[in-house]
Image: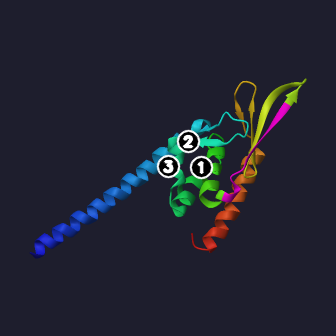
Amino acid sequence: MRLRLIIFVLVIKSNILYSQNILEDSINFYIKKLDWNSFTFTPTYARSLVLSSEAQKLVYLEKKDAVNKLFPQIIDSQKTVIIHIILSKIFEPQNAYLSTSYIYKEKIISNLAYCYNNLNWQIDEHGIYIINADEIKKIKTYWEERISFLTDRKL
C-alpha cells in the first residue's frame, strides 16, 4: 500500500512538472512569434487594435510571467510595440488608447503615425513600420519604473 502511495505521488509530481514545462515552452513559442504582424487595425473610422491569436494568448499571462518573459524582449524593435500593447493590456487596461495622425509630404499622406499608451511609431507609404530608437528607450524606461513599482506592491 505504501509503495502505491509513493508511486502515485511521483506520478502526480512528474505530471505537474511536465505541465509546467509545456506552459514554459508555449509561452516562449508565442513570444518568438511576436512581431509587427502580431496586431492589425480595424478598418473603421475609429481605429482600434486587434491582436493576433498568439499575442492574445500572452495577454492572459500571470503578471509575474509577463514581467519575466515579455519585458526582456521589449528592446527588440520588431517586438517593442506588440509587447508594450500586451503589457499595457495586462497592467494598464485603462490606458488602452490608440491615436492616429497623418504625416503629409507635398499635400499627400506619406506616413501614418500611431500612439498607444504613450508609445509612438509610424507606417510609411510602403507599409514599412518605423519606430525610433528613442521611443524604444523611453518605453523600456517606462516599464522598468512601472514594474519596479508593481514589484514593490507584490505582483
Is residue 71 part of the magenta span, yes or no?
no
Q: In the image, what residue type sits under mark 3?
A: Lys
The image shows residue 100 at horizontal and vertical percentages of 77, 40
Q: What is the CA distance from the residue labelled 2 to the residue labelled 3?
A: 11 Å
The mark closer to the camera, 2 or 3, is 3
Dividing the picture into quadrants, the one containing residue 148 is bottom right
Instruction: Identify the residue at horizontal 25%, vertical 65% (top origin).
Output: 12
Instruction: Confirm whether residue 74 shows in the render.
Output: no
The mark closer to the camera, 3 or 1, is 3
Discs 2, 3 touching: Cβ within 8 Å = no
Q: Looking at the image, is mark 2 or mark 1 earlier in the sequence?
A: 2
Q: What is the CA distance from the residue labelled 2 to the residue labelled 1?
A: 10 Å
Q: Looking at the image, is mark 3 or mark 1 earlier in the sequence?
A: 3
Is residue 97 part of the magenta span, yes or no?
yes
The image shows residue 90 at horizontal and vertical percentages of 59, 58
The total of numbered circles placed on residues is: 3
Question: In the orientation shown, which residue stands out farthest toward the right?
Answer: 106
Instruction: Identify the residue at horizontal 66%, vertical 42% (top origin).
Output: 77
Q: What is the CA distance from the residue labelled 3 to the residue labelled 1?
A: 17 Å
Disc 3, SS: helix
Q: Which mark is residue 57?
A: 3
Magenta-highlighted residues:
94-103
Q: What is the crowding at mark 3: few (fewer than 14 residues within 10 Å), some, or many (at least 20)?
A: some
Instruction: Identify the residue at horizontal 54%, vertical 62% (top origin).
Output: 63
Discs 2, 1 touching: Cβ within 8 Å = yes
Disc 2, SS: loop
Q: Which mark is residue 34?
A: 2
Looking at the picture, does residue 97 appear above or below residue 131? Answer: below
The mark closer to the camera, 2 or 1, is 2
Q: In the image, what residue type sits under mark 2?
A: Leu
The image shows residue 132 at horizontal and vertical percentages of 76, 41
Q: Which mark is residue 73?
A: 1
